[in-house]
Amino acid sequence: MWLEKFLDIISRFLPFDSTSGIEEALARLNPDKFYLENVRSVLGVSDQRALQICESAVRQGFLKRRVEVLCPDGSAAASSDTEAGLPPIVRCWREEDGHYEEVELPTNVLQKISFYQLNESTAHLLF
């Protein structure tokens, strides 16, 4: 069901041929967490165009933009609706001499990345 809603959102901004395989590629995306690069790659558009599509869907309420803070190994430590909503300290795992230990790191020194998710509360309005 989420795939049909997402395809409807995308088709408002970018017409595509239904035989192009986009549906299959979109079906592999997690509706609760997908990145701009996923959309760019699936649709075969530029970063800027993928951003326009996603942000327009956010403005219309069909998608939500969220942010996550990444541990040094690239794993997600925490996520929130806004950067201000992230915790000040996160726990990450660090490998040292083949042993892993949990460390606490300040969020403000770690990389943050935006991601998108289908907004279930408004997606039903598409149909």
Image (tube, helix red, strand yellow):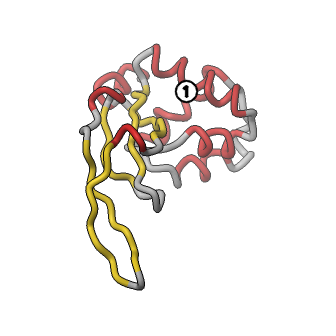
Instruction: Tell me which amino acid carries mark 1.
Output: Cys
Q: Looking at the image, which is closer to me, 75 or 62?
A: 75
Residue drawn at point x = 74 percent, y = 46 percent? 20
Would residue 98 appear left or right of 14 to someone viewing this image? left
Which quadrant of the structure image shows residue 96?
Answer: bottom left
Would residue 103 appear left or right of 37 to someone viewing this image? left
Residue drawn at point x = 69 percent, y = 50 percent? 21
Q: Which residue is mark 1?
A: 54
Q: Quadrant of the C terminus?
A: top left
Q: Residue 15's x, y, as percent? A: 71, 27
Q: Residue 22's x, y, as percent? A: 66, 45
Q: Residue 29's x, y, as percent? A: 50, 50
Would residue 97 appear left or right of 100 to someone viewing this image? right
Q: Residue 87's x, y, as percent? A: 24, 39
Label 1 Cα crowd, 10 Å radius (few <14 / some 14-19 / many 20+): many
Residue drawn at point x = 75 percent, y = 33 percent? 46
Q: Looking at the image, which is closer to me, 79 or 123?
A: 79
Q: Looking at the image, which is closer to me, 81 or 96?
A: 96
